[in-house]
Image: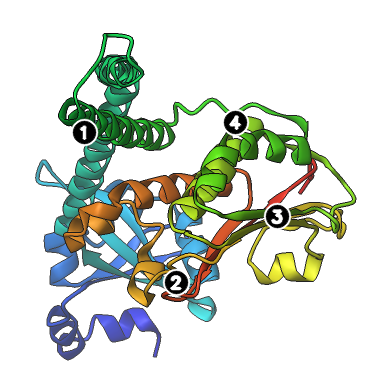
Amino acid sequence: MDFISFFKKANASHIFDYLPDGLILTDFKGKILFSNDHAKELMGAQEGDLLSEVLEVNMSMIEGLVENNVQSVFKVSHNNVDGYVELSASKIEAESKFIITARNVTQTHKFMKKMLVETESSKKVNRDKNSFIVKMANELKSPLHSIDGFSKALLEGLGGDITEKQDKYLNIINKNAHELLFLIDKIVEQSRLESGLYEWNYKHLDIINLLQTIVRPYKEILVEKSIELTIDTDEISKRTCFTDEAALKTVIDSLLDLAVKSTYLGSINIKLSHPDKEYVLSQEIECPQTATDKSFVQVSISDTGSGMSDTERNFIFDPYYQLESGNKKNMAKSLALAIDKALIKNMKGKIWVESESMLGTKFSFIIPNERLSV
């Protein structure tokens, strides 16, 4: 007995009408030979119709569903109402027929479409907000530059003699203005990255010379805090690095600043090296076939400072965790490290931290030091 005879048996038709999905039998040209009640109600699929007249679908698409053993969503218009059905199909080769099932996914499709629109709208709002912050950067920082500059001038005696109490208050004003300026700088930097307004400028540079330039302004505070700084470049044989100088400088300066702030009467070590390809791959960094053991550079900055707890270490690169945890003290630090992570990621590298409470901290990152073709 062939399928068409079986489908048209009275008892079989009643059984198919109880199915939760639409069921359609067509020939290879798409002519509908049988459809259950649910298919008729869902799509208006009547015997004798062509499937292409019922759905925005052709038989090559149905062949594709069969060959790839997948489902796909198609648009259907019935009684002047648009809907969406998920089709799956199988082929009866011996009888030159297709068995097609149709599931109503209109509500799911509309929900997903609504979610997509809301997500895109949310992304646009976020981009616009970040763009606004970036464009307002100078207006946000100018008053603080004035407070920082004038309070520093008063402390240096440019406005005349000041009392001990005035000196104390001016130092507090200057310190708070400086810290707020740093925080705003980081917020603007984060917004620039999130909005895609960061201007990347890759070029060749001498990484050792760059490192020495970054370290120079810290010499005075290192002496004040009795911190011994060592720079180990013995393992570097390729000083030239092809990367974004401003981004690399931001990351190294940020990590060094953090090490200096958390270290007292101790030491800080900066080490440059070339990680081998196997180690680079173990860090899940993109490493093309053409790469060599000299194609990447690793920078590690370790200190003997206060270290981090397990919780702090796990969330240290999350810019918003400190707000959620109520620990606003480390907000600027987490924001700075989140920026470092984003910059390193854009440079096709990876950054990580190793630390224990009261046992110091070691930040390391790896980036390509040459132009690599993938």
Q: Earlier in the sequence, mark 3 or mark 1?
A: 1
Q: Tag 2, which secondary structure?
A: strand
Q: Residues within 10 Å of mark 4 (few under 14, many from 20)?
A: few
Judged by depth in the image, the label closer to the viewer, 3 or 4, is: 3
- What is the x, y in percent for residue 59? 46, 55
* Residue 216 higher or lower than 3, as above or below: above
Q: Residues within 10 Å of mark 1 (few under 14, many from 20)?
A: few
User: What separation in Å lies between label 1 and label 2 (alpha carbons)?
Assistant: 91 Å
**Marks 3 and 1: CB-CB under 8 Å?**
no
- Mark 3: secondary structure: strand
Q: Which residue is mark 3?
A: 230
Which one is closest to the eye, mark 4 or mark 1?
1
In the shown orientation, is residue 276 left or right of residue 132? Answer: right
Label 2: few (<14), some or many (≥20) within 10 Å? many
Residue 66: horizontal and vertical position, in percent?
49, 70
The percent coordinates of residue 11 (x first, y second) are 16, 90
Please give the name of the residue rendered at 57% of the width and 55% of the height, measured from the top-left corner: 227
Look at mark 4 in the image and give the residue it sits on: 246
- The colouring scheme, among rainbow, by chain, secondary structure or one colour, is rainbow
- The residue located at (78%, 56%) in the rendering is 288
Which residue occupies 74% across, 70% down? Answer: 279
In the picture, residue 191 is in which quadrant? top left
Q: In the rendered structure, which disc, 4 or 2, sits on the residue that comes first in sequence?
A: 2
Q: Which residue is mark 2?
A: 97
Q: Tell me if I can see residue 44 in this picture.
A: no
Q: Which residue is mark 1?
A: 168
Distance (Cα) linking label 2 and label 3: 78 Å
The mark that comes first in sequence, 1 or 2, is 2
The mark nearer the N terminus, 3 or 4, is 3
